[in-house]
Image: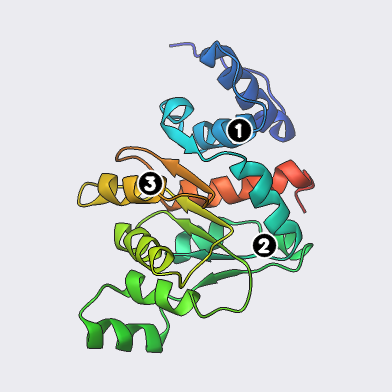
Amino acid sequence: MTVQLENVLPRDIEKRSFEIIGQELGRELDPEQELIIKRCIHTSADFDYADNLKFSENAVQKAMEAIKKGAVIVTDTQMAKSGINKRALARYGGEVLCFMSDEDVAAQAKANGTTRATACIDKAAKLDKPVIFAIGNAPTALVRIYELIEDGKLDPELIIGVPVGFVNVVQSKELIMSLKNVPYIVAAGRKGGSNIAACIVNALLYKIDDRRD
C-alpha cells in the first residue's frame, strides 16, 4: 500500500495545520476570537469549538490587558499548569499557580466536606493579585467561583471555563455565563479539558507576542 504524505518541514507543521483548519472551517471568524478558536481546534482536532466557545463582550481584549499588568493564572490541574507557556507569561510578571496538591487545601477540603477544587478557589480568592482562572477539569471550581463572585468576595480578570465531563459540567458553565460584568471564555456543553484551558491561555499570550521561546 502506498501512502501519500505531505512534504512539510517540522517548523512549518503548525502553519500548515492552521491552513487546513481555515480551509475546512469554510467561514470567517470574529478576528478577536479567531486565534483562540483555531488553537482549540488545532489542539483537539475538534471543529465543534468553532461554535461551542462562548465569549463575553470584549473578553479577549480584557484578558490581554490583565496579562500585561501581571495577572496570575490559577488552574485546577497540574496538567493545565504544565501546558501553559510560563516563559511568555513571565515577560509580564505573571505566573501559573495550581493549589491542588497543597496540604492546606487538602485539609480544608476534608474539614469542610468539599472537593479540593473548591478549596483551591477559596485559597485563590485570598491572592492580592489580579487573577485569571483556567478551569479545565472541575465543575465544582466553577461553582465556587460563581458563589464567591455573587457574594462580592472575588473579582477575577477572566474565567476560562472549559471543564470536560458529564456531572454538573454543563450547569457550572451556564452559571459562569449568567454572570454580569465578569469576562469569560466558556466551552458550552460537555467538551473541554485541561489541554483546552492551557491552549486558551497560550492563545491569549500569542496574540500579545508570538515569540515561542
The image position of residue 168, as x and y in percent, is 22, 52
Tell me the amino acid under the disc marked 1. Answer: Gln
Tell me the amino acid under the disc marked 2. Answer: Lys
* Mark closest to the chain's N terminus, 2 or 1: 1
* Mark closest to the chain's N terminus, 3 or 1: 1
Q: Which residue is mark 2?
A: 86
Q: Which structural element holds mark 3?
A: loop
Q: Nearer the viewer, mark 2 or mark 1?
A: 1
The quarter of the picture where the N terminus appears is: top left
The image position of residue 190, as x and y in percent, is 29, 40
Tell me the amino acid under the disc marked 3. Answer: Ser
Q: Nearer the viewer, mark 3 or mark 1?
A: 3
Q: Which residue is mark 1?
A: 33
Q: CA distance from mark 3 to mark 1?
A: 20 Å
* Above or below: residue 57 compared with residue 128: above
Q: Residue at x 54, y 49 (%)?
A: 183
Q: Is residue 3 left or right of residue 11?
A: left
The image position of residue 21, as x and y in percent, is 56, 21
Q: Residue at x 51, y 80 (%)?
A: 126
Q: Which residue is mark 3?
A: 178
